[in-house]
Each structure stands twice: as C-alpha cells, then as structure tokens.
Image: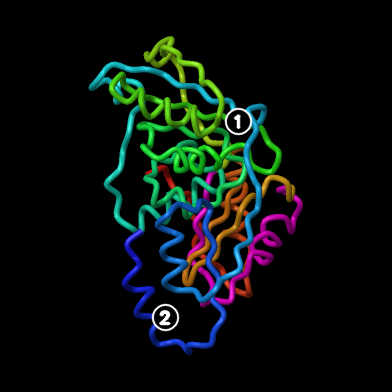
Amino acid sequence: MGFHDDMAEILSATPSQRQTLLFSATYPETIREMSAAFQSDPIEVTVDSHHSDLKIRQHFYEVQKGKRNQALALYGDLEQKDRDLVLVCFANGSVPVLVATDVAVRGLDIKELGAVINYELPRVPEIYVHRIGRTGQAGRNGLALNLFIASEANHVNAIEAYLKNEVRLEQPAGLDIPEGFSLTAPNVTLCIDGGRKEKVRPGDILGALTADKAIQGGLVGKIDIFDHVAYVAVDRSVRKIAIRVLSDNKIKGRRFKVRILHRL
C-alpha cells in the first residue's frame, strides 16, 4: 500500500528482540515478502473464513464500453474533512450510498451493509472477494452487483476460477430512474458543537435525548465523538424533536448548538 519504507524506518528504531504481529485479510506473495523482511521465524496462523453463495448473491452485468456512467452515477473529489464526515454519515445510516476506492474499502467497518457494487472488476480475484465480503457479514445475507465490459471477460473468468463456481451473466434490465423514485436514508445526523475536549460522552448524548421520554432509545443510532464536535444519528421521524430536546437540555452542564447535517 506504499508504506513499506515508513515501516522499515520505524522498525529500524526498535529493539532486535521484539514481538511483531502482522495481520492481513489476504496473503499474496507481496505480504509473504514483507513478513520475511520484518519478522523473524514467525508462526503463521490462518483462519478459514469464506462467504457461501447462499449469503452473498452475485450478479454480473455486461455493459457497453463507455456506458458505465449510465449504469451507475458517480461523484467524488471531496476534501479529507468532507470524506471523514461522509463516512460518519454512511456508517450511521444517514447517507444511503458511498462511493469508495479500494484504499477506503479496506479501512471501513460498516455494519449491515446491504450491497456492494463494483463499478469495475478488480484484476486480482482476492481483491474482489475482499470487496464483496463487506456485505453479508455476521451471518446476514448480502448482495454484490458487478459491471464489466466485454474486454474484461477475463476478469470474470479469473473470479470464477478462484471461487470454483460459475457466475451468471446478465444484461441490465433498465437504467432509467422511475418517476417519483427517491433514495432516502432511514436516519439523519445531528451535529453537536461539543466533543471529547468538552468531556462529552456518548452516554451524555443518549441520556439527553431520552431524558423526557419524547424519544425512545431505539430511535437513537450511532454516536461519534471527536475533539470539539459530536455526531448522533436519529431516526428521520424524530429529527425535529431531537433537535429541540438537545437544544433545550444541558449536556455536561452546558448548552451546545445543534444542527442537522445536510447531505453533501
């Protein structure tokens, strides 16, 4: 991932007698070479983990060259602070769709991810398996939708060989958005202008929201605390009540500004 030289410099400053643990979701030759360079006679522990076909439904759609954008609309080019905020909103159910590269995907832990869409198929089958493994976790059912053009059929063949199973090739039934269609997230994210430095904790926010019983605890979602700001997801149906409750009630003996984060 481009951190080899940094790791080598850090490890050069550590004692020769040390314990070094390396964790990797996949174990290609490059990882073996890294292990040989940074570890001394390591013990290898392998955990067998795979997703059965019953858990993740995989669909492969052949599209015409240059027509990917018509099959899937994309948007990116965000500043880092905006990327961090999008991740918070996606993880707490306030943003319905996240567009990400492999670098982002490998670092994300999103519970109950309904589907993974591959805008392009990776050349390495292990990466494909790692991508789609973000859905269908913890025994849940998952869905993988994959776009490819005719010249990328070899990528599909490689995935079939790796999975030891044939995949079904399909044609997109229709790419037009139905009239009246909207993609709405179940939650909204509230921003509180107080965080870790102000001694705000998740329990304080949950307590403030549920203190007068106007909001049930089950309607409060993920709470993220940063240095000077906190984010809390609430069910869309109680967003106005939540703003009023948080604005009227004190948190840690103080009143903080509260606002809804609009979709970026």
- Is 85 situated above or below 158? below
Confirm whether the magenta stretch covers residue 195: yes
The residue lying at 52 percent from left, 63 percent from top is: 230
Q: Is the C-beta separation of discs 1 and 2 under 8 Å?
A: no
* Number of the label disc, if any, that sits on residue 89: none
Q: Which residue is mark 2?
A: 11
The residue lying at 63 percent from left, 56 percent from top is: 46
Q: Total of numbered circles in the picture?
A: 2
The residue lying at 53 percent from left, 88 percent from top is: 17
Residue sitting nearer the eye, 259 or 12: 12
Q: Secondary structure at mark 2?
A: helix
Q: Find the distance from the CA under tag 1 to the CA under tag 2.
A: 40 Å
Residue sitting nearer the eye, 130 or 48: 48
In the image as oriented, which residue stretches furthest toward the left?
A: 66
Q: Position of residue 13 (x, y in %)?
A: 40, 87
Q: Residues within 10 Å of mark 2 (few under 14, many from 20)?
A: some
Q: Secondary structure at mark 1?
A: strand
Query: Which range is magenta?
Result: 188-215
Residue sitting nearer the eye, 213 or 40: 40
Amino acid beneath label 1: Ile
Q: Which residue is mark 1?
A: 56
Q: Position of residue 169 (x, y in %)?
A: 46, 15
Compared across the picture, whether 191 is left or right of 207 comes to left
Confirm whether the magenta stretch covers residue 175: no
Amino acid beneath label 2: Leu
